[in-house]
Image (cartoon, rainbow, N blue to C red):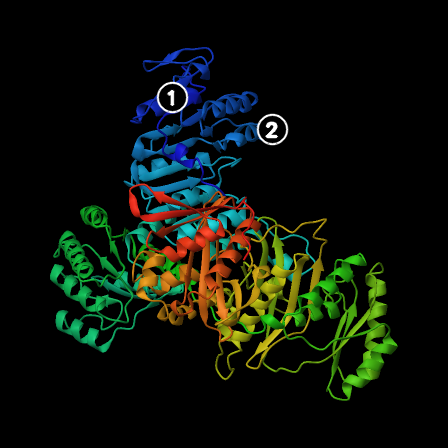
Amino acid sequence: MTIRNLDFMMAPASVVLVGASEREHSVGRQLALNLIGDGFAGPIHLVNPRGGSLAGRTFHRSLGELPAPADLAVIAAPPPSVPGLIAELAAMGTRSAVVITAGFDRDQRQAMLDAARPALMRLLGPNCIGLMVPGIGLNASFSHIPAPKGDLAFVSQSGALITGILDWAASRRIGFSHVVSLGDMADVDFGDLIDYLAGDTRSRAILLYMEALTAVPKFMSAARRAARVKPVIVVKSGRHAEGARAAASHTGALAGSDAAYDAVFERAGLLRVVELDDLFNAAETLSRLPHLMGDRLAVVTNGGGAGVLAADRIADLGGRLATLAPGTMAALDRALPATWSKGDPVDIIGDAGPERYRSALEAVLSDPGVDAVLVVNCPTAIASSEEAAAAVIATIKARAVSGQPKPIVACWLGDSAARSSRVLFAESGIPSFATPENAIEGFMQLVRHARAQDQLMATPAVVDGEESEDGDKVRAIIEQALGEGRTMLGEDEAKSVLSAYGIPTVPTEVARSPAEVETIARRLLAGEAAVAVKILSPDISHKSDAGGVRLDLVTAEGARIAAEEMVSRISRTLPKARLHGFVVEPMVRRPGAHELIAGMTVDPTVGPALLFGAGGTAVEVVADTRLALPPLDMGLARAQMEHTRVMRLLKGYRDRPPADLDAIAATLVRLGRLVCDHPEIRELDINPLLADATGVIALDARIRLADEAREPRPPMALRPYPSNWVRRAELPGIGEFLIRPIRPEDEPLYAGFFADVTSEDMRMRFFTPAPGLTHRHLARLTQIDYAREMAFAAIAATGELIGVVRLIADPDYTHAEYGVLLRSSLKGRGLGWMLMQHLIAYARAEGLEELKGSVLAENVTMLRMCRELGFKVESVPDEPTLRQVVLSLAAPPVSA
């Protein structure tokens, strides 16, 4: 990922158009007219080898005639000429280009990229309609409709869609900070632009129209960063494209590509909407309103029917109405007519004037059980809709001034009667909707986004047992199978793999013949009521479908006969299937247990994904599953479970107790770690995974493998926990401690850590004596994606956090800034030196070129350590109290 030179594209000082034309209705003419007619203040040069002029501007015949290189080139020339033009422009000093041209073959596309690479010239397109930045008057597109100035950034993979959106937005007074047509994304893609726009102060929200993703890990890193600072909302087309393929497991068959995209958007904290209308409605709602702290909605309306419609729609979408507190009910009784509705929705009666709206709104906003309010107005002949709107706006502003804001959305029904009120709401930054149903949908978008943000910042619980996971055992099983030319593990091997990662399984024994089945069954039946016998074959994935499973066998002879019958049946129906024997295991008796499925598949775009849902033999028919991206923590696993219908059953009902939800979540977490640690795993199925109040147990499992050296697995969307950077250390006065990459669940350790950091040491590190140590701030310190940021925590033998060192790399991943902080009571004992050496070693291993930091000039201890570690100490212009320390990572490391 890099945003280098994107400033030259998004905020150029000068532009050149190569392919300007005088010809009516040509792309080159429309591009030229747009460039010179939208108020861009910098130089604009037009180039055409045949010469000519347009709108009083003479065309240059070649790039060599330009008086100076342009920051941005717009190219509308035939594909064979483009690589040469890019090379010439790059040599002149141009650092960005929009390639409008379509029709590149593979060689021409690669030649264009090769020409741009030496100068890191950034390319948008090819096959796009261009770029618009209305705030600076830049219209480098051939759209016949200009983009009005505003603060929404719109990035679209479809060029044709952009003109329709601009037409639609103009009639609704929607403006844009950027409108970007990505085209074929030969260079600049979604990840690059989201990363750039995350730091752009002109845009309050980022809107995406997406057909397909490329470079998903890059996209995830950028999207997670952007979603923490502003709403990112996406429409993804192709929701119902056939995503299933022939697979060796239920998981592979159930995991369609659209479900994988859902997992990406959810994990990144993005809001996915279905329609383009929703895209802009969501942008208005999310970017205008304060953060939603819960999902309890109160409805205040002067029309009972409108309130019922709102209540119905919130039930449809899985939301909930607030339960009003007794104090709120009393306040409403005093303010409203005796005939008011006595509950939520709050019907303030059709003759309600502005004072009644104000009183009712103040009452419900003061209720601690209300998280947001929908205010509805139905036009009547005896009360002014506009006066009611003014009262609502005044109440909202008064609450904001008092520091008690809650999200409020409005719905003013009607056309002419509501028009002026909607203008008032728009001017005050209050989202308004035409119908109660639309308003509820807008509120639920707010709910979904808040949940995604909370999940992005959540502190996960710890899953015990990671230290006891036996990765070596799993590697040995995988290597043996691949060495024998097998890509499917036997059931006994698959269960051994699961057991090695702490996932409970049924004890399983392998018999090579029906006679051996009888022997094993006789021994097991001495302590069990019944046994199960299953066929063992690399060619039969779904054993039940082939008649390869017999349950509840209560005699050893019956087990042998069942095995013989399986052989006979499969020999007739599947004569080519290889039979390697049988699996014999005790029957698990768990009356009332739920049959679940947990598994993993590899999506060709997204990479490895974990699946959870309702299991059993009808799993494809029920289709109650959800994908999530590994690695998971307990919070993420529970969130994945909540997206399934079976979760309602797992929570218990009637006389059926709830299942052990933590045990299910822990299974998903461990499954994620297994997938991260062993890239040879390509499909994994646990079906059924039995779950009840006593825990979980895997009854059946299958795992498909591939040779990673010959068939590399697509990269994971999220970089897994870098466990190879864990180190044990010891220092005098500190004792033994662990240096390891920080984890999200480390957040609670910061309370004790900061309690032992003096305000002076805090000031030296953060340049302020008291940084905001809120949950959101601490989550930013502990929840990192390990892709562009790293933090190493020093953990004492007592489990306490005693020091942290971190780096944050630039998007080019060439330079990084560092920071280090220790417990004040442990300074001077070598801990800071050891942590810095560990961080420098990591930076070198990652291929970073330079590590730098800002240090107060009075922090002589840090400056001395930096010099000893090989940093150069430099003054900062116009900042006499600061020093910049810079370490070239190409230099040899400094020994301890």
Q: In this view, does 506 lie above or below 477?
A: below
Tell me whether circle 2 and circle 1 mark residues in contact (CB < 8 Å).
no
Q: Is residue 347 above or below residue 413?
A: below
Q: Is mark 2 on a helix, strand or loop?
A: loop
- Residue that carries the numbered disc 2 in the rendered image: 105
Q: Is residue 528 left or right of residue 789?
A: right
Q: Can residue 25 be seen in this view?
A: no
Quadrant occupied by the C terminus: bottom right
Q: Can residue 60 be seen in this view?
A: yes
CA gap, disc 2 and disc 1: 26 Å
Q: Is residue 821 above or below residue 126?
A: below
Rendering coords of residue 779 (x, y %): 41, 62
Looking at the rendered structure, which numbered label has been put on residue 138? none
| Residue at 35%, 44% in the rendered image | 875
| Residue at 82%, 83% in the rendered image | 556
Question: Which amino acid, by three-letter code, is at mark 1?
Answer: Ala
| Residue at 17%, 62% in the rendered image | 402
Q: Earlier in the sequence, mark 2 or mark 1?
A: 1
Rendering coords of residue 97 (x, y %): 45, 29
Q: In this view, does 463 lie to the left or right of 679?
A: left
- Residue that carries the numbered disc 1 in the rendered image: 32
Q: What element carries label 1?
A: helix
Callout 1 crowding tier (Cα within 10 Å): few <14, some 14–19, many ≥20: many
Q: Is residue 775 left or right of residue 105?
A: left
Rendering coords of residue 192 (x, y %): 46, 42
Q: Nearer the viewer, residue 894 or 467?
A: 894
Question: Which amino acid, by three-letter code, is at mark 2?
Answer: Asp
Rendering coords of residue 696 (x, y %): 60, 76
Q: Nearer the viewer, residue 462 or 249?
A: 462
Callout 2 crowding tier (Cα within 10 Å): few <14, some 14–19, many ≥20: few
